[in-house]
Amino acid sequence: MLLLFVPIGITVDLAEKVGKMLENNVPFGEIAFYYLNFTVYFATLLFPLFLFLSVIWFTSKLANNTEIVAFLSSGVSFSRFLRPYMIGATIVAMFAMFLGMYLAPIASQGFNEFKFKYLKKNKSVQQTRDVYQQINDNDYIYVSNFIPKNKSGINFTYEHFEGNELKYKIFADRIRYIEKDTAYKLTTYLKRSFTDGIETVEKEKQKLVKFPFELEDLTPVEYAAETKSYGELLKFIAAEKRRGSPNIGRYQVVKLKKWSLPVSIFILTIIAVAVSSVKRRGGMGVNLAFGIAIVMIYVFFDKVFGVMAEQSNFDPIIAVWFPNLVFGILAIYMLQNAKR
């Protein structure tokens, strides 16, 4: 089913974006690499849903041929009948987990970089106004306006604390990253230092300074969490929490979905078997229609709660796991009915 639907998805996406690609003279090699990343990116998102439809299709074929009746009539329990499905779901869930934690982040980076480079040129992928970050336990930075293209910012402030005591504070009208020196050039530099209650002031028209933060620490891109493997993601979230990032909810959703996705595979497999194991008037079409309706409701829950967690103070754990909880209860109920 993935092999059937991914080419359709590529065709639809290409038809929508070919105009912008031609307008921007995108090289063929970059387009080919973009659609390779597109395949991995969307296959990861839709993996449980394709598995769900596949199980419905396969099991409905068995039911229409009355093979399931033959299984159960010969003394095979429904739990034993379900076992191969669960073994298959385990294999698929392990593959989906590996895909989501290691391969999908690489694909996501290529996919998003292409999109913002060629298709969304005028849209910012970073928070560039009133950037306030905690770099580590002791250091804070502020930039009123940051320009990623020029690697520069306006109205820069750097504060260094030891405990609760402010040791020094640096001001500059302008900050610019100098790549060859791996340092920052500060214009209208002013440093106020405090030692034993005595203040000293240092002024310079321009000064080259090395700070304990990287350029991307100033304004991480909005899809930064999606491009990191699981270990890198944990470190990234911990660092962003220290900095007081407003996007923690979005990053937590990305992390939690790496675990909820494999669990959803088991839940949807059980529902699919329960739905399609009974022979119905109308055959496979009725089962598929019912299955698609369940999938649409699941996607609706997943998207709505995900957006709530990203855009508000709604708990990311509830947002990510609530659809699985609801459909897990539904799976148990439908499985009991199917056994009867």
Image (cartoon, helix red, strand yellow):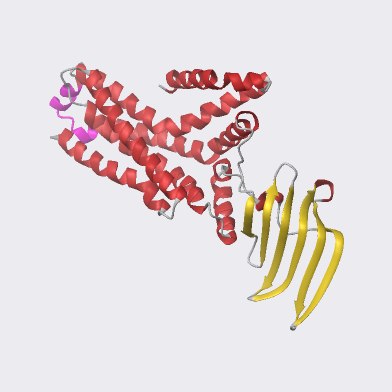
Q: What residue is shown at x 15% (from left), y 36% (from top)? A: 337
On-image quarter of the N terminus: top left
**Relative to 185, residue 60 above or below:** above
Question: Would residue 194 be found to the left or right of residue 116 on screen?
Answer: right
Residue 263 seen from this side: no
**Front one among 71 and 198:** 198
Residue 338 lies in quadrant: top left
Q: What residue is shown at x 84% (from left), y 46% (from top)? A: 180
Residue 313 lies in quadrant: bottom left
Residue 24: give x, y in percent of width and height: 67, 23
Q: Which residues are magenta?
A: 68-81
Residue 4: give x, y in percent of width and height: 43, 18
Q: What residue is shown at x 57% (from left), y 29% (from top)? A: 37
Question: Would residue 91 be found to the left or right of residue 222 on screen?
Answer: left
Question: Would residue 191 be found to the left or right of residue 128 on screen?
Answer: right
**Relative to 161, residue 34 above or below:** above
Residue 137: give x, y in percent of width and height: 63, 66
Residue 101: give x, y in percent of width and height: 52, 41
Q: Is residue 314 magenta?
A: no
Q: Is residue 74 magenta?
A: yes
Residue 90 lies in quadrant: top left
Characterize the magenta stretch by its predominant secondary structure: helix
